[in-house]
Image (cartoon, rainbow, N blue to C red):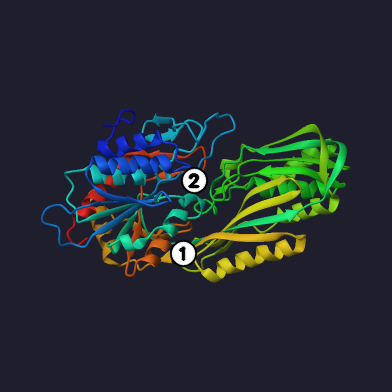
């Protein structure tokens, strides 16, 4: 079965993980992975449907003697975040993920691994492939576009679902069972800027070497945002001389903390003379050990266009918006309650464009986040477009579904899992809101540093999660 990954108990899930790692499946590039899943269903004689959004639903009949039990929905998303190191020449549109095993750790060669949510997809395929696991009727939903705003889940026709119990395979901690997540909304701020033409001597600035991370799960770890640090650096320079920016380019994915940012500016400030002081100022904001490899470089450059002084001030103001954890929950579990990620900044063709991702468990808090960005836009003469909003979700910690998971977990690991919430978006909110009476949990194996090129997965953890899910499906009360 598995050809590359070794030292495993359950061959099937790792075989399928290797197989899907060969298929490029970044968000909006899910046609091939959807076809692979459909071909799998046909080969196994399973009923399936695929919609125009590349969502795929496969149904597997209950094992003999369990036909009268309630069906179970198992769900994971097929797309992955495509992040890579600058030194990597990986083409996410065409290239397979190059897997590297280091003992019990699985990683990729300079790119995201795609364990988020490849492990979930692989486990679902293995369950559908198995003839040995006892289970009720299974409805396996493979959704698309999760990483760009839970798009596929929000567009699926849930009249095709008969189950009222759901296992979402998109958690990244083996020892937890998730019973709630935050909602989110993305914002695009667009500001027209006045361009001045000429021949200007200036400087390029590069901020690199930050660790980044998942903009929900890692937002409280103190890791710095390269776009925010660029704003602080430009502000520092502007206080010592007139400044005009030619461009700023930082970040890429709305749900990833930016690791790099680049700018070109023209200034009357004595930049070479104050550069060490400027770098020390920026580095004073570094608190996370993972960010200690930050690099801030300065190069001479020329440009034929710059922003006006006033529009440069608008840019700096936008890059100075409140960012990171804005408020913590006041009751356990003590997690971020409201957060914001200044994810992306681009300047091109006379337009400044900035992308934000805001998260909260409560709709009113998401409203306050969008209102704050609307106010910022009004202040600098910009417009905002709020999009891809999705709801939060929270369920009791004592549902039969949770009880069954705890029982199965205990049978495999001999201890109790932690029942908690997560400060990230999960498709559970959309699905439970679309199917009356749907209970849900989210579980998964140990995956670290999601949405970065340093993403890793613990191999034995995926092995155990497969055992736990198998044990849970064998419980007839499920």
- Indicate left or right for 43 with 350 as reference: left
Towards the viewer: 43 or 170: 43
Q: Which residue is mark 1?
A: 392
Q: Which image quadrant for residue 371? A: bottom right
Label annotation for residue 28: 2
Q: Is residue 61 above or below residue 112?
A: below
Q: Which mark is residue 131?
A: none
- Graded by Cα atoms within 10 Å as few (under 14), some (14 to 19) or many (20 or more), the crowding at tag 1 reads many
Quarter of the view holding residue 36 = top left
Nearer to us: label 1 or label 2:
2
Q: How many marks?
A: 2
How far across and down, in percent of the image, does residue 76 sit?
37, 50
Q: Quadrant of the C terminus?
A: bottom left
Residue 440 image offset from top left, x and y in percent: 34, 62
| Residue 100 in the image: above or below residue 213 | above
The secondary structure type at the circle numbered 1 is: loop
**SS for tag 2?**
loop
């Amino acid at each position: 079965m598995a050809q590359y990954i070794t030292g495993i108990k359950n061959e099937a899930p790792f075989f399928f993980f290797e197989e899907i790692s060969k298929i490029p499946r970044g968000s909006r590039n899910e046609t091939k992975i959807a076809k692979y899943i459909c071909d799998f269903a046909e080969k196994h004689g399973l009923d399936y449907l695929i919609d125009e959004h590349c969502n795929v639903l496969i149904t597997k009949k209950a094992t003999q003697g369990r036909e009268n039990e309630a069906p179970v929905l198992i769900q994971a998303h097929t797309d992955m975040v495509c992040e890579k190191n600058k030194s990597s020449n990986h083409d996410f549109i065409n290239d397979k993920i190059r897997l590297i095993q280091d003992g019990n750790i699985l990683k990729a060669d300079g790119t995201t691994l795609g364990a988020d949510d490849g492990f979930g997809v692989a486990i679902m395929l293995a369950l559908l492939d198995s003839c040995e696991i006892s289970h009720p009727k299974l409805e396996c939903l493979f959704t698309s576009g999760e990483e760009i705003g839970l798009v596929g889940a929000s567009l699926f026709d849930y009249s095709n679902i008969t189950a009222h119990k759901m296992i979402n395979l998109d958690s990244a901690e083996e020892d937890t069972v998730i019973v709630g997540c935050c909602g989110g909304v993305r914002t695009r701020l667009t500001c027209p800027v006045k361009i001045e033409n000429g021949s200007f001597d200036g400087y390029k600035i590069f901020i690199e070497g930050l660790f980044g991370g998942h903009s929900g799960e890692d937002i409280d770890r103190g890791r710095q945002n390269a776009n925010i640090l660029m704003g602080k650096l430009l502000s520092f320079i502007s206080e010592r001389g007139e400044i005009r920016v030619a461009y700023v380019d930082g970040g890429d994915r709305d749900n990833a903390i930016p690791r790099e940012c680049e700018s070109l500016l023209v200034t009357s400030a004595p930049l070479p003379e104050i550069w060490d002081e400027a770098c020390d100022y920026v580095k004073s904001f570094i608190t996370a050990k993972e960010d200690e490899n930050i690099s801030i470089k300065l190069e001479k450059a020329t440009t034929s266009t710059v922003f006006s002084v006033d529009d440069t001030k608008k840019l700096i103001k936008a890059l100075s918006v409140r960012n990171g954890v804005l408020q913590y929950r006041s009751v356990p579990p003590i997690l971020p309650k409201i957060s914001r990620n200044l994810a992306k900044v681009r300047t091109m063709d006379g337009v400044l464009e900035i992308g934000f991702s805001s998260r909260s468990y409560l709709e009113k808090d998401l409203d306050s986040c969008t209102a704050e960005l609307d106010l910022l836009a009004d202040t600098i003469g910009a417009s905002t477009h709020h999009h891809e909003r999705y709801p939060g979700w929270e369920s009791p910690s004592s549902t039969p579904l949770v009880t069954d998971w705890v029982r199965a977990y205990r049978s495999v690991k001999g201890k109790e899992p932690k029942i908690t919430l997560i400060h990230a978006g999960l498709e559970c909110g959309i699905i439970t809101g679309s199917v009356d009476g749907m209970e849900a949990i989210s579980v998964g194996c140990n995956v670290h540093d999601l949405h970065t090129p340093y993403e890793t997965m613990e191999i034995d953890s995926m092995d155990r999660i497969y055992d736990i899910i198998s044990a849970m499906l064998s419980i007839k009360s499920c």
